[in-house]
Amino acid sequence: MQLKPIFDNIVVKKISMEEKTKSGIVLPDTIDKEKPQQGEVIAAGTGKILDNGTRSQMEVKVGDKVLFRKYAPDEIKIDGEEYLVMTQTDVIAIIE
């Protein structure tokens, strides 16, 4: 199944970030941790339609790694994979 977001929505795949203690113990990504704030854009809409009828340009594109607001995305699960859906305005920065 493919997702095709509309307007200024984007679909992001979580980037799990393993943490290590000072002694080298790897802490797994668990439910008790805060939600991830990084991800990779796997699909992007065509832009929001403005009041004057024109379409705004999307700043993010497929393949961009982004930082986003912690509680902004909606979580969805398709074919056993977890994705985040948010608007472009929820993205804080593109990681280069």
Image (cartoon, grey):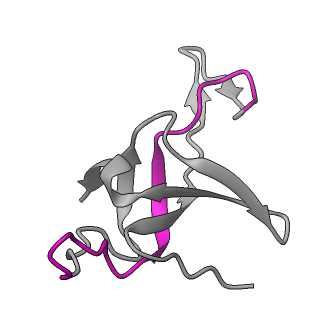
Image quarter for residue 31? top right
Residue 18 among those drawn in magenta: no
Q: Which residue reaches farthest left?
A: 52
70 or 9, nearer to the observer: 9
Q: Residue at x 18, y 82 (%)?
A: 54
15 or 21, nearer to the observer: 15
Residue 51 among those drawn in magenta: yes
Q: Residue at x 75, y 85 (%)?
A: 1
Q: Is residue 43 above or below residue 15?
A: below
74 or 7, nearer to the observer: 7
Q: Residue at x 31, y 52 (%)?
A: 89
> What secondary structure predominates along the stretch shown in magenta?
loop
Q: Is residue 32 left or right of residue 11?
A: right
Q: Is residue 90 above or below residue 34?
A: below
Q: Could you tell me residue 30's position as x and y percent?
A: 74, 30
Q: Could you tell me residue 20's position as x and y percent?
A: 58, 25
Image quarter for residue 50? bottom left
Q: Which residue reaches farthest top?
A: 22
Q: Could you tell me residue 22's position as x and y percent?
A: 53, 14
Q: Tell me where the magenta segment starts and ends, as one range.
A: 30-54
Count the numbered circles shown: 0
Q: Quadrant of the C terminus?
A: bottom left
Q: Which residue reaches farthest right?
A: 80
Q: Is residue 41 left or right of residue 20?
A: left
Q: Is residue 8 above or below residue 24?
A: below
